[in-house]
Amino acid sequence: MDMLTQWIGWLPNLAPGLLVSLQLTGLSLLFGFPLGLLFAVMAAAKFPPLQWVSFFFVEIGRGLPALVLLYLMYFSLPDAGITLTSLTTAIIALTWNTGAYASEYFRAGLAAVPLGQKEAALTSGLRGWTGFRIVILPQALRISTPPLAGLAVLVFQGSALAFVIAVPELMSKGFEIASITFEYLSVYLLTAVIYGSLTLVFLGLVRVLELRLGRHLQRN
Amino acid sequence: MIMELLPAIARGVGLTLYVTGASLLFGGIIGLVLVGAVRSPVAIVRAIATLYINIVRVIPPITWLFLIYFGLPQYALRLSTIQAAIIGFSIIASAFMAEIYRSGLLSIPDGQREAAHALGLSAVTTVGHIITPQAFRVALPAIATYGIGLLKDSALASTIGVREITYYAQQSAKQTHEGLLSFIVAGALYIVISLVVALVSRQVDLRLRRKIGVA
């Protein structure tokens, strides 16, 4: 009970942190998913240099620990004369990370569209970009959506990493309270409960999304 | 510059491998118990194991580390940074390993168990000689992939002060003002280790395939 009253007292201090966490997650997804699609399309391009660029960014974004990517941005951008807030730096790093992982899901989605669809599009006179946009992409997106939604949940958890470069998100706010009150266990339990319950809600939404997208398949 | 940075940062490779390896080992063992519990005939055991797996997975790794390193000493034991990191990552790995084992077990057709039963093999022999070897082969690539993921997660241990690759990279970045280069070196080290793990696991996988005689 004691802990619960403590928790209620801390919530007003943690709430702004949670907002920053959600903002960081939201923006990283907003920029990361289109970036991932771009990487996936580039990887399938006929022009080799485009493939190399895509390979380079995807392999670094996936191969490096997200933490190292964050530090890389944080310590190197100012040297290049670019001064950004820690939040912007975190958004760039997480966007790269998200884009790299997302590109794999987009690539799998694009590969899963049968070749016949492309041929059918060609036969119908839908060539190149038009055929891709109207025929291939919508089908690929439907296949990629469930894993992408799962990735979104992971990005939310990953947003806690921004703590290390002093972004005022949930973990930082928790750390602040803990270093003032010395109630480490209690504070981190509360952050764990917040992250955990929100993740559960998101996972529930992903389940609903999966069911909805599969609805037309269940009917037949 | 790289000639100075590389040895300074590579000092952390040992602890990175140690934390990752120990956590994968302990997590792998706890994961075995968990997967047994998830398939237990007793409903309450199943419920507890499923709850544990879900709780572990929905909390971010960094929150786990802070809970264990900063939270536990308040009431109970005081842990070294390395112990705290290994405990934290073992808990996380156990949940993921349990899921990997479970999908490995699911891939074994019921017929195998029935055939073993028909041959009069005991339950222990069936699990030890029929189910586990086949399930392990199916699970191996997933275990290797998870191991590489855990290797990257182990970078988080630097936040509680474990002197691994990222920790030394951060030190170098602060001391030499070569931030970009320091973390490029650190990143390259992670990628090289990942590649070695991936290559070894593929070799083992190929050898197992040949031994069992599937294409």
Image (cartoon, coloured by chain):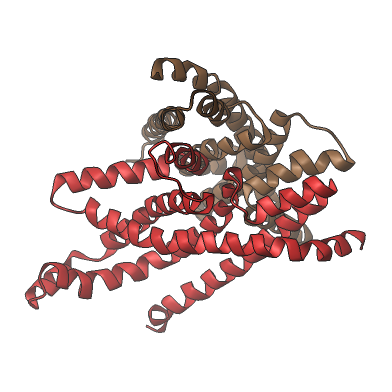
Q: What letter labels the chain drawn in brown?
A: B
Taking depth in this image into account, of A68 and B211 the one nearest to the observer is A68
Taking depth in this image into account, of A182 and B129 the one nearest to the observer is A182
Residue B182: image location, x then y, percent: 46, 28
Residue sitting farthest toward the right: A2
Q: Is residue B199 above or below residue A122?
A: above
Q: Residue at x 45, y 38 (%)?
A: A72
Quadrant of the rendering where the C terminus of chain A is positioned: bottom left
Q: Quadrant of residue B69?
A: top right
Q: Quadrant of residue B77?
A: top right
B65 horizontally vs A89: left or right:
right
Q: Quadrant of residue B129?
A: top right
Q: What letter labels the chain drawn in red?
A: A
Q: Residue at x 51, y 56 (%)?
A: A155
Quadrant of the rendering where the N terminus of chain A is positioned: bottom right
A27 horizontally vs A140: left or right:
right
Residue B134: image location, x then y, percent: 49, 42
Q: Is residue B114 visible?
A: no
Residue A132: image location, x then y, percent: 19, 69
Q: Is residue B111 above or below residue A213?
A: above
Taking depth in this image into account, of A158 and A16 the one nearest to the observer is A16
A127 horizontally vs A2: left or right:
left
Q: Is residue A173 visible?
A: yes
Residue A137: image location, x then y, percent: 26, 69
